[in-house]
Image (spheres, rainbow, N blue to C red):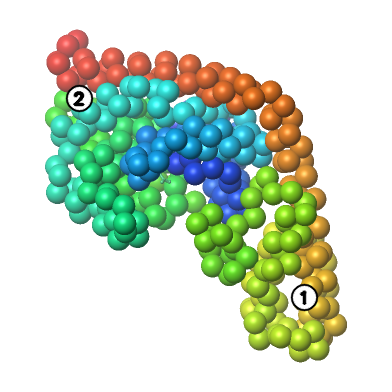
Amino acid sequence: MEEKKEQLRILSGMRPTGKLHLGHLHGVLKNWLKLQDQYQCFFFAADWHALTTKYDSPFDIPQNITDMALDWFSVGIDPEKAVVFVQSDIKAHAELHLLLSMITPVSWLERNPTYKEQQQELKGKDLATYGFLGYPVLQAADIIIYKAHKVPVGQDQLPHLELTREITRRFNYLYKPIFPVPEAILTEIPKLPGLDGRKMSKSYNNAIFLSDSESVIKQKISTMVTDVERPRKSDPGDPENRCVAFNLHKLYLPEDRLKEIVEDCKAAKLGCVQCKKELANAIVEFLRPIQEKRAELSKDPNTIKDILHFGAQKAKIVAEATMEEVRNALWNRA
Ligand code: TRP
């Protein structure tokens, strides 16, 4: 890691929800891939955060971690370039979370917009728990325990980042200024539509997973919404403005072919069925090397465990060193 040009520290985490889809790849992972070449990066599976909303059925979280990590490494997240680990392997996050909880006013947490939104969204689940209220405090601990400068996140995480910054300032002010106040790097997430035109998401059942087989991809793409104002092939289409599937064409087909498709669609010469077959083939080809890597990593069920263990050892050294400083600051030792 020392040979990296930029010594800025980057940290980001994902809750382990299982297998990842194309939306994760284009929204988050592409960004991580770029960052791991330029900066000191820490990427981790936030399994304790997953527990805040899944405390009643936590049993599949370990498998979800493995599935997610397998996807990370298949797309090229490199454990030699970045420190990749599981949150609950680093107990120091919990210790720092506890200490930060002492200095965090409850009113800051109650004001957090995602606290109320999530409770609304996940109706039927009691999220009036102490742990869920403290979600952003744990996130703050995740970030500052590695003294991260930058945190790549989506728009939805900005309130959490703002809380991290406030908690960090408060710690620095009360005890000793040992933490950089981290900044968000807003990831430009190209809104990737799913099969039905809504944002691609596992919970909408409209996603194409990185690990989907060729036949599943072909079947799924054949159901994808195209241009609703073009019910028949003989109607001229408007792919650039009306076709949902064309958003994916733009990612997976070469520029010159896209031009031809636009012309032929507008001229009512190319039908959606055929056009989506071409898209499905392009996605299959795009995913081929990723899936080959996945198959290789899956051969030995211990591979992922070993890689994550290797990452945890590196993370632990940094986290423990920070905790020494934190304890010294808190108890006013030299
Ligand atoms: N809350 C983040 C999410 O749901 C996951 C997360 C946990 C995280 N700890 C973090 C992200 C620290 C960035 C930094 O996506």
Question: What residue appears at the point 53 percent right and 57 percent down from the top-left corner?
Answer: 201
Left or right of 207 in this view: 284: right
In the image, taking residue 233 as reference, residue 66 lies left or right, namely left
Amino acid at pointer 1: Cys
| Crowd around label 2: few <14 · some 14–19 · many ≥20 (10 Å) | some
Residue 151 in sight from this viewpoint: yes
Mark 2 and mark 1 residues within 8 Å of each other at the beta carbon: no
Q: Closer to the observer: label 2 or label 1? A: 1
The residue carrying mark 1 is: 272
Say which label, 2 or 1, has the lower sequence index.
2
Residue 182 in view here: no
Q: Secondary structure at mark 1?
A: helix
CA–CA distance in space, label 2 to label 1: 63 Å
Left or right: where 114 falls relative to 231: left
Above or below, comparing residue 251 to residue 196 in the picture: above
Mark 2 residue element: loop
The disc labelled 2 sits on which kind of residue?
Lys
Residue 259 location in percent, x, y? 79, 72
Q: Nearer the viewer, residue 8 or 313?
A: 313
**What residue would you read off at disc 2?**
176
Left or right: 316, with 138 as reference point: right
Comparing 324 with 53, the one in front is 53
> Label for residue 302?
none
User: Residue 281: x, y in percent?
Assistant: 81, 58
